[in-house]
Image: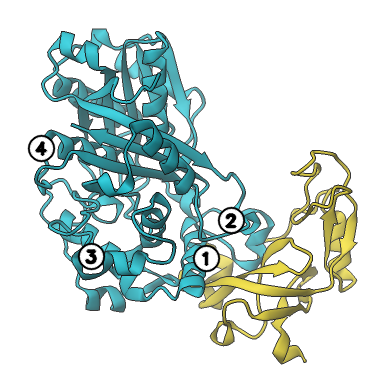
């Protein structure tokens, strides 16, 4: 069964286009607030139109979970699989996957972006920084 | 002027819990309200407010009016509220405030759902584009929080297990409970993963059922000769609203703000509480609620729950009818009802001499929280 596909709205298109180019971008408002995923208005000052900015790709692993239950049939033959929560050094947080697999993960481990491709979709995923070095 | 103690829960009622095929949520709400009115000993004609929590698994347009119609009541005030599991205590506090403001006289607060025999897709739904990574289910959000608590505080599995053991021990003798099977620590530790670090026995039941409360002023309860009114001493609320990945901290919850408001309203402190009914959708929720309510300091819940301290007979008995892990997965009203029984002195596992009960309700993935303090 096919994996779920992203809903690429006009608002979020710069995010998906950047990943196709191998970069991760996030929005940062003129007031300084930075975030993911895409929002039309800044949640701090409420102004619209925050520009996209390229992330360094460096971040920290905050937490992760390992699925032993498939809540979607496309993931049934991937069990057990994990989902991780990473905070970018610029501040925004995102759910992702750590390519090293769950066994080597530790809390607050440094991670680095490594874009993955699932069919035509480019996904933001990470490697443990020590492993990437 | 404080509203502390000026309103009471005059009656409680509920349906059977578990698998109730063929019953829709309107029917379950009507049965629960009928039982609550019988418990209060008052006639339906006195009710002029109906506050309804929406069924989690099956939202319906104008649901509050559908419940009122099924009850044959034309309310002055009421409707349906969506705030996840925190909505029950929220609606109870709305009822108290509406009564005090002269907007109604006697209120029904009710909830029913049938995700066990009906549709439970809501609990497994994809969460936006994060579905690309396989991010599904309510359990996964709590698993992420559970792991972060372990990372920050070194919380051992046995601390989570202690919460499951307490609820399961308390529910084992409860004839209404859906899961009447006590649990040992060895069994807990051997329980299969659902979403690691969540084991099966960390997770709430999925249940059909309904429950209801009758709320009125203390003065009205005296006039009507209500037999066992339980005063509402305090309530409070807190909402982060941000989705889990966007929160600055995963291990601090809105329980802290909600409880601070409720304790201030009632003029009491955490150490005055004799018994607690704490929302146990997942075991980590109870540990973090104990910390955020001030029963212990942050990160000290493992020591607080050790050695049976939250079991009946312990320092602070928690979830004395079995909670969401044993009595029913219904999101929250069973905890309010057990608080009422403890304050009446009629609980099956009564805490002797208990004079103050704290109840917590929580919604979403710790998005919303509400606190209730009951007295006698």
- Residue B89: percent from the left, percent from the top? 38, 34
> Helix, strand, or loop for circle 3?
helix
Colour displayed for chain A in the image of the structure: yellow
Sooner in the amino-acid sequence: mark 1 or mark 4: 1
Q: Gap in Å between the C-alphas at discs 2 and 3?
A: 27 Å
Q: Where is residue B190, by image quadrant?
A: bottom left
- Chain that the image shows in cyan: B
Sooner in the amino-acid sequence: mark 2 or mark 4: 2
Judging depth in this view, the residue of A106 and B219 nearest the camera is B219
Q: Residue at x 72, y 77 (%)?
A: A126
Tag nearer the camera, 1 or 4? 4
- Does residue B65 sit above or below B270 in this rendering? above
Q: Share a chain, discs 2 and 3?
A: yes
Judging depth in this view, the residue of B134 and B101 nearest the camera is B101
- Residue B138: percent from the left, percent from the top? 48, 56
Contact, CB < 8 Å: mark 2 with mark 1?
yes
- Subunit ID for the residue under disc 4: B
Mark carried by residue B144 = 1
Dot 2: within a 10 Å radius of its alpha carbon, few (fewer than 14), some, or many (20 or more) residues?
A: many
Q: Gap in Å between the C-alphas at discs 3 and 4?
A: 24 Å
Circle 3 sits on which residue?
Answer: B165
Judging depth in this view, the residue of B3 and A83 nearest the camera is B3
- Residue B311: percent from the left, percent from the top? 18, 59
Circle 2 sits on which residue?
Answer: B244
> Helix, strand, or loop for circle 2?
helix
Q: Gap in Å between the C-alphas at discs 2 and 4?
A: 39 Å
> Helix, strand, or loop for circle 1?
helix
Circle 4 sits on which residue?
Answer: B345
Dot 4: within a 10 Å radius of its alpha carbon, few (fewer than 14), some, or many (20 or more) residues?
A: some
Tag nearer the camera, 2 or 4? 4
């Amino acid at each position: 069964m096919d994996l779920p596909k992203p809903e690429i709205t006009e608002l979020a298109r710069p995010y998906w286009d950047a990943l196709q180019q191998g970069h991760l971008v996030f929005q940062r408002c003129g007031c300084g607030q930075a975030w993911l995923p895409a929002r039309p208005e800044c949640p701090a000052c409420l102004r619209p139109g925050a520009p996209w900015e390229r992330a360094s790709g460096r971040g920290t692993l905050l937490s992760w979970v390992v699925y032993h239950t498939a809540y979607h049939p496309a993931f049934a033959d991937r069990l057990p699989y994990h989902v991780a929560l990473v905070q970018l050094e610029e501040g925004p947080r995102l759910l992702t996957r750590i390519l090293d697999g769950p066994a080597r993960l530790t809390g607050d481990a440094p991670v680095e972006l490594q874009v993955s491709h699932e069919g035509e979709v480019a996904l933001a995923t990470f490697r443990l920084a020590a492993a990437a070095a | 002027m404080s509203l502390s103690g000026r309103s009471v829960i005059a009656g409680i009622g509920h349906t059977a819990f578990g698998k109730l095929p063929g019953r829709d949520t309107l029917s379950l709400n009507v049965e629960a309200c009928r039982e609550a009115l019988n418990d209060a000993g008052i006639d339906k004609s006195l009710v002029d407010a109906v506050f309804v929590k929406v069924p989690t698994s099956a939202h319906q347009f104008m649901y509050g009016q559908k419940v009122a119609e099924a009850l044959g009541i034309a309310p002055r005030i009421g409707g349906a509220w969506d705030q996840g599991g925190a909505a029950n205590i929220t609606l109870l506090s709305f009822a108290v405030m509406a009564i005090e403001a002269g907007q109604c006289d006697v209120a029904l607060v009710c909830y029913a759902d049938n995700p066990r025999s009906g549709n439970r897709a809501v609990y497994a739904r994809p969460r936006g584009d994060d579905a690309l990574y396989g991010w599904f289910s309510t359990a996964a959000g709590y698993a992420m929080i559970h792991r972060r608590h372990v990372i920050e505080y070194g919380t051992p599995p046995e601390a989570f297990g202690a919460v499951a053991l307490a609820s399961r021990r308390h529910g084992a003798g409860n004839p209404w409970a859906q899961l009447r099977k006590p649990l040992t620590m060895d069994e807990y530790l051997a329980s299969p993963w659902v979403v690691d670090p969540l084991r099966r026995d960390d997770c709430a039941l999925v249940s059909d059922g309904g429950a209801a409360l009758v709320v009125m002023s203390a003065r009205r309860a005296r006039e009507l000769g209500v037999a066992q009114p339980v005063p509402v001493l305090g309530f409070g609320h807190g909402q982060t609203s941000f989705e889990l990945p966007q929160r600055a901290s995963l291990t601090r919850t809105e329980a802290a703000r909600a409880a601070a408001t409720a304790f201030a309203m009632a003029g009491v402190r955490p150490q005055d509480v004799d018994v607690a009914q704490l929302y146990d959708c997942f075991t980590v929720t109870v540990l973090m609620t104990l910390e955020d309510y001030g029963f212990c300091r942050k990160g000290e819940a493992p020591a607080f729950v050790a050695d049976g301290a939250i079991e009946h007979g312990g320092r602070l008995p928690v979830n004395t009818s079995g909670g969401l892990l044993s009595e029913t997965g219904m999101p929250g009203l069973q905890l309010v009802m057990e608080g009422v029984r403890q304050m009446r002195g009629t609980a099956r596992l009564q805490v002797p001499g208990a004079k103050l009960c704290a109840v917590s309700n929580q919604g979403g993935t710790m998005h919303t929280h509400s606190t209730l303090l009951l007295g006698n």
